[in-house]
Amino acid sequence: MTAVDWGWFPEHIGDMTALTLDHLSIAVPAVFFGLVIALPLAVVAHRVRRLRGLILGASNVLFTIPSLAFFILLLPVTGLTRSTAVTGLTIYTLVVLIRNSVEGLDSVPAHAREASVAMGSRPLRTLLTVELPLALPVIMAGVRVATVMSISLVSVASYIGYGGLGQLFTDGFQRSYTTPVIAGVLLTLLLALLADGLLVGVQYLCTPWARSRTRTARTKTSRTRRTRTSTAGATTAPSTTATTQGKGV
Amino acid sequence: MSSIPAPRRRTVLSGLLAAAAVPAVTACSGGITSLKGGGSGGSGAADSGAGLVIGTANFTENQILGHLYAEALRGSGVKATVKPSLGSREVVVPALEGGDIDLLPEYQGNLLLHFDKKAKETEAGELQNALAAELPASLEALPYAAAEDKDVFAVTRETAEKHGLKSYADLRKTDGELVFGGPAEDKTRVVGLVGFRERYDVTFKEFKALDASGPLVKGALKKGDVDIANLFSTDADIRENDWVVLSDPLHMVPAQHVVPVVRSAVADAPVRKALARLGTALTTSELSKLNRMVDVDREDPDDVAAEWAAEHGLTEN
Amino acid sequence: MLQLLADLARWLTGPAQWQGSGGIAVRLLEHLEYSLLATLAGAVLALPLGLFIGHTRRFAFLAINLAGFGRALPTVGLVTLVFLAGGLSMWPVYVALIALAVPVIVTNTYAGMTAVDPDVTDAARGVGMTGPQVLFKVELPLALPLVMTGLRLAMIQVVSTATIAAYVSFGGLGRYIFDGLAQRDLVQVLGGAVLVAVVAVLLDLAMAGLQRSLFRNRPADAR
């Protein structure tokens, strides 16, 4: 391996920018469409107990299929287009998004829902104005995981030419040239970090009620040493299983 | 906890959805038509503002060729964009048939074998006629270039001397002791194990699925993990490593002149003229030189192509 | 569609398909070898780290950030990088798979440890248990369900990702996916994908069974 060719970076700012935008144009729609599909399914899974196992199980099984195979199998259907990459990634976001949304809805206290119903709200209104907002922190935790995972997985689609920053891996691989690969890895990490930070910010703005709760929780923590560090987990990531899920290929 | 005023709740939710949707929508309409970047947005190949969409396969020479096509087309006033490294032939040719791309730099023999696994033609002129017959009606192979990049099977100098190898026929002397390295498709195609068995009666000890003239097969040949490797004749590493390219007395490998394959619907006169002009100027030695600049000197395929096209007067009408 | 499924069934059940050096049996074993070795190596690295962070509650930021970092790391890039650095060997594959497994195991182990009721550990210390005794006799047994969850998740991811071995010319079920594409044989691709999914699901069920048998005599409070 040759050392990193630092001169490459300033010469390729335009390319890196274009590839980063390209990367986002695949990862972001995947999460968006994933959410559009996952939320209704999660509501169904939450309401209809009998379908719950089926929906969660199916999304789990889909998750075990290697993403490259998905891209290849989608080729005859969606062609060699951006849609193929987006569709493949959307499927992988489902497992995290559905699970977190179901858990989020489960976590809504019954009395909150009952109060809304008692006030005469229709079920849809209760769902939109009470349940979903209260489930938002858990759903957002899922959105964060799904986003970071999608950003990391886009590079697999470089095998079908839509890998965003992953195109740099192919290029480096073909020419035994380390520098573009390092650039690709670093930019992917940076992008994931920024996207995650952005979502934390969005969540902060969207859940004003949670802010005060976090503050009180935090003061409590400092008072009683024994609750220790688990508050972060309580507000942003109650579901350990879902938050630690990811995928490589 | 349930005492959030209702209007606030709704803004919260719609705000979230909007936040997710805005970048998605802007990204989808994507105007990223930059150079070697990630290609163009949208799926309709010819109808978008990108002009002619040139697809390229996943090896550097093909990307150089794609950029050369783009330069030549632009020189004739045709708008064109290059989609770099879309995948193997098995991915890009169907994409051409499906209209996701408009134009593809290809190689005569291998392209023909893609459509007709049993094709016997080996000479350039015959191949061109066969292509005209075998290609789907929606596609057309334009006149081929002077440059040729053939599949070759090479051994190290050491192996060649040890077994006295000069041609593929000599491989029979090795009694199936050699390990063969090439792309996975070599296992099932004529320019590969099938041809060696049927044309030369040669078998190998083992087949290793690597890549075609890529880092895997070249690394394996260097390390001795494979004895004979599928390379491309224009690969700069052959001379660099003093590898021995064996001859093909029985014409197992067909001629592989560079040939533009285009969707007939977009092949108008300026396109034909531009690519014909490029084909005359582009010789095998020029192509090898370009490969060397990209693979060994690590220049960018688009820069190399732009310079070369300008030098050869292809950028002005 | 139906035709594809019929072809798939034929591909999966053909006896010739299962034999020989490129047969399904060999590919399955290779795949299991890569996956199990990588998960095991990941566990050996990650478990002590997770237990340490969970027990001492120090470097907790590390556990949390490691998860995010691990998820963001593009596997293809990592494989390529290690390949370019060290040449063709199984190392690129193992490095990438272990990098995938470690964060999942660390964070779940850590989460399991923090979920242990502080009153319980305090009581254990109160009756004179030493640090290691508290760790191994109290915290670890209580944290075990989440530790196992971490191992199971890591395993699923590793099994699905081990297909990348074929990208750098090695075996495993990924061969069918890469070769299927190269030979324009979608049935082969589909067959490979189905086999990977089946292996992942079966291994997960096996781990779940193991987990259940481990906790047979335990009160249900450990979730």
Image: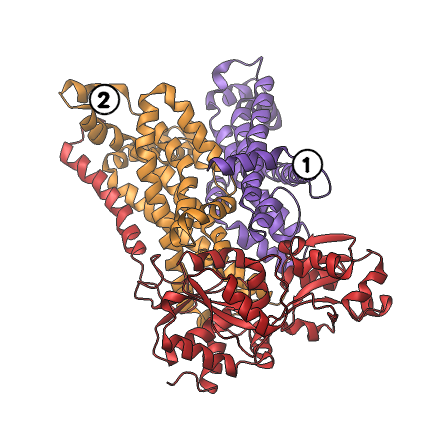
Residue on which the image places disc 2: A113
Whether residue B183 sits left or right of residue B32 in the image: it is right
Across and down, in percent, residue A244 comes to 47, 37
- Give the amino acid type for the residue marked by disc 1 in the picture: Trp
Which residue is pictured at 15% across the width and 32% down the height?
B6
- Mark 2: few/some/many CA within 10 Å (<14, 14-19, 20+): some
Write down the colour of chain A: orange
Disc 2 vs disc 1: which is toward the camera? 1
Q: Is residue C90 visible?
A: yes
**Nearest the eye: A70 or B27:** A70
Q: Is residue C154 visible?
A: no
> What amino acid is labelled 2 in the image?
Arg
Q: Compared with residue A103, is residue A167 higher up or lower down, i.e. above or below?
A: below
Within 10 Å of the Cα at label 1, are there few (<14), some (14-19), or many (20+) other Cα atoms? some
Residue B3 is left or right of residue A61, and the answer is left
Rounded to the nearest angstrom, the CA distance separating label 2 from label 1 is 56 Å
